[in-house]
Amino acid sequence: MWRVFILFISLLALGGAEETPKMLHAHSIEVSYQAKDGTLATIRVGRDSDLRCREVPFDGRTFWSEAYPLKTVPEFCKKSFITTAGVLAPMKMHEKIDTYGELEVLEFLEEMQEDPHMLFVDSRKQEWFEARTIPGAVNIPFIYFTEEGKWEKKKQEALALLGVRSTKEGYDFSEAKTVLFFCNGVWCRQSPQMIEALLEMGYPPEKMKWYRGGLHSWLNVGMTSISPSE
């Protein structure tokens, strides 16, 4: 379960510029992932804040203004995300599939480090995964399961990774892994489509979890991310 870490400050260099004070919040965990060169790398995952932003004054009108971030907010504190894509997803996909938030994702990642029967899946297309993802995630694009007959080899490889065996009678889910899926955000249909396709195949719903907020929510609250292609 949780190994809660005390808040601590580290100084991180930004591209040779002045060192910038950073704070990694409590509930940070060490996560292993495969680096671009194929080696096993580790990274501490948590909520990462620029301490200078703590000194920027704001009130309710400023915080919720449609013009936010305002000119008074320093560049290093600004975050902007596209909010007009896709369609909103329901809070609950299936009565037996748990919907996760950021803390549940962290707990899942922590347990996954010691449990080979757990898997964290970024279900977006490869180019999106390579641009930015959550440490510890493996990429299984949803199209492998939604574009029938087009990705059969990739689909079989993905099923093996999920712990599913193909048999003459169909699919054997007896060793299916407990999987947490995510995509771009509450407006993204990619992970829901993959989950729906797996449900149709017979994947046990109680072995599937869904991070509804996805990468959009993850970045919005300042959580650690990586770019696997770099």
Image: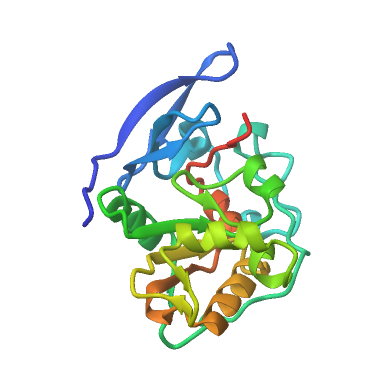
Give the left or right position of residue 186, taking residue 117 as reference.
right
Q: Is residue 66 left or right of residue 32?
A: right
Q: For the point 55% across and 30% down, which residue is it? A: 36
Residue pictured at 48% horizontal, 42% vertical: 224
Mark count? 0
In the image, residue 168 lies at what x, y percent?
50, 78
Q: Nearer the viewer, residue 148 or 93?
A: 148
Residue at the bottom extreme?
95
In this rendering, is residue 109 above or below 199?
A: above
Q: Pick whichever, 33 or 149, lies toward us.
A: 149
Residue 141 appears in the figure:
no
**Picture quadrant of residue 31:** top left
Identified at 40% across, 32% down, the residue is: 40
Return the residue nearer the eye: 42 or 21. 42
Q: Position of residue 157 (x, y in %)?
A: 54, 56
Q: Quadrant of the N terminus?
A: bottom left
* The furthest residue to the front: 168
From the viewer's perspective, is residue 52 above or below residue 104? above
Does 74 appear above or below 171? above
Quadrant housing the C terminus = top right
Work out whether residue 134 can be spotted: yes
Relative image position of residue 103 (x, y in whole percent)? 37, 59
Q: Is the image coloured rainbow, by chain, by secondary structure, or in one colour?
A: rainbow
- Quadrant of the rendered structure where residue 183 is? bottom right
- Location of residue 100 (image quadrant): bottom left
Q: Residue at x 51, y 64 (%)?
A: 159
